[in-house]
Amino acid sequence: MSAFPKTSRNRVKRLPERAAYDKETIYKILDQALICHVGIAQENQPFVIPTIHARRGDALLLHGATTSRLLQHIQAGNPICVATTLLDGLVVARGIFHNSMNYRSVVLFGVGRVLEEPQAKYDALFALSEHIMPGRWDDARLPSKKELKATTIIEMPIEVATAKLRVGGPKDDAEDYEKDWWAGVIPIQQKFLAPQPDVKLHREIPVPSYLKNYKR
C-alpha cells in the first residue's frame, strides 16, 4: 500500500486540495521533523505532549520513563493522535485576512504497544538515536541494563495518516492586486550552528564529522 485510505479520521475537509495521503510525502515530513506532539484524552481532559519520535517502516517509535503518564496511557491500549509540522515561510498578503504560512504537516492515528523484549527495546533506541543524530550510536556509551529497564518503548503501527501542505505566494482578492501594498513570502530555514564543546571535556577532542556537518 503506497497511500493511506481516506477515513473520517484523516480526511482533510478544510482546503482539501492541500492534503496528501501518500506514504512518500507523509514519511518524508515525519523523518525530517525532530519533535512531534502526541494527543491523548484522560477523564475528559485532553493533553498534548511534545516528545521525540522515530519512524521505522510503517510504525512510529516513542520512548520515555516507565512512569510517564503518556506512555502509561498508550500502554493501556488507548488510541492516540500524533502531529508534527515543518514551517517553511511566512506568507505576507495584501489583505490581512489572507496572511498565511507555508508549511508541511502530518497527523497520524494509531494504537501503540509496549516493546518488552530487551533486544527489541535496544533496537528501538538505536532507531531513535539514528533519527536524531546519525552516527552517534557508534561513538558513545550505549544504554546500560538499568537504563534500559527504566525506559518504556512504544511502537505504534501507523494505521491512518494524512499530510497537509501549503506552498507558494499570497492569494489575495482580485481588487487588491492593483493596490501598492507589498506582498510576498519570508522564507524560514532551520539552521544548525557549530557544535559547542562541553566545559568538562578533560582534553581537547575533535568534533566528529557527523556532528560538525549536521543537517536535516
Image (cartoon, helix red, strand yellow):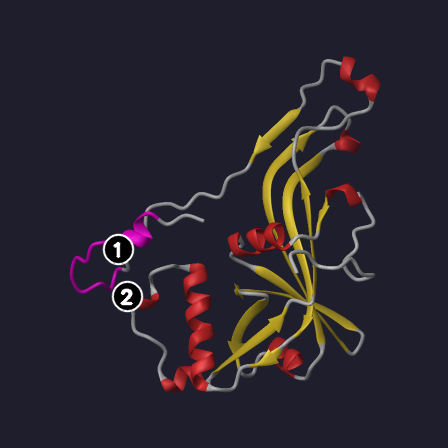
Q: Position of residue 164 (x, y in %)?
A: 70, 48
CA separation in Å, label 1 and label 2:
9 Å
User: Residue 132, located in which quarter of the rendered image?
Assistant: bottom left
Kind of element beneath mark 2: helix
| Residue corresponding to mark 1 | 208
Q: Nearer the viewer, residue 193 or 128?
A: 128
Q: Which secondary structure dominates the residues rendered in magenta? A: loop
Q: What residue type is labelled 1?
A: Pro
Task: Check disc 2 and give the amino acid type.
Answer: Asp
Task: Tell me if residue 174 comes above or below residue 57 in the rendering.
Answer: above
Neighbourhood count class around disc 2 (C-alpha, 10 Å): few under 14, some 14–19, many 20 upward: few
Would you place residue 187 above or below residue 47 in this image?
above
Q: In the rendered picture of this protein, how many numbered marks are placed on residues?
A: 2
Q: Please determine whether, in this image, residue 210 is positioned above or below residue 116.
A: above
Using residue 104 as the reference point, say whether residue 99 is left or right of it. Answer: right
What is the span of residues highlighted in magenta in the rendered image? Answer: 199-213
Residue 3: say if magenta: no
Residue 177: x %, y % from top left: 77, 17
Residue 204 position, x and y percent, is 17, 57
Report if the CB atoms under discs 1 and 2 are less than 8 Å apart.
yes
Locate residue 208, reporting x and y percent. 26, 55
Quadrant in the picture for the N terminus:
bottom right
Q: Mark 2 points at which residue?
A: 139
200 magenta-colored = yes
Q: In this view, does 200 lie to the left or right of 130?
A: left
Residue at 56% of width from left, 52% of height from top?
Answer: 28
Instruction: Kindly identify the residue that appears in the image at 52 percent across and 86 percent down.
Output: 116
Residue shown at 79% from the left, 55% from the top: 11
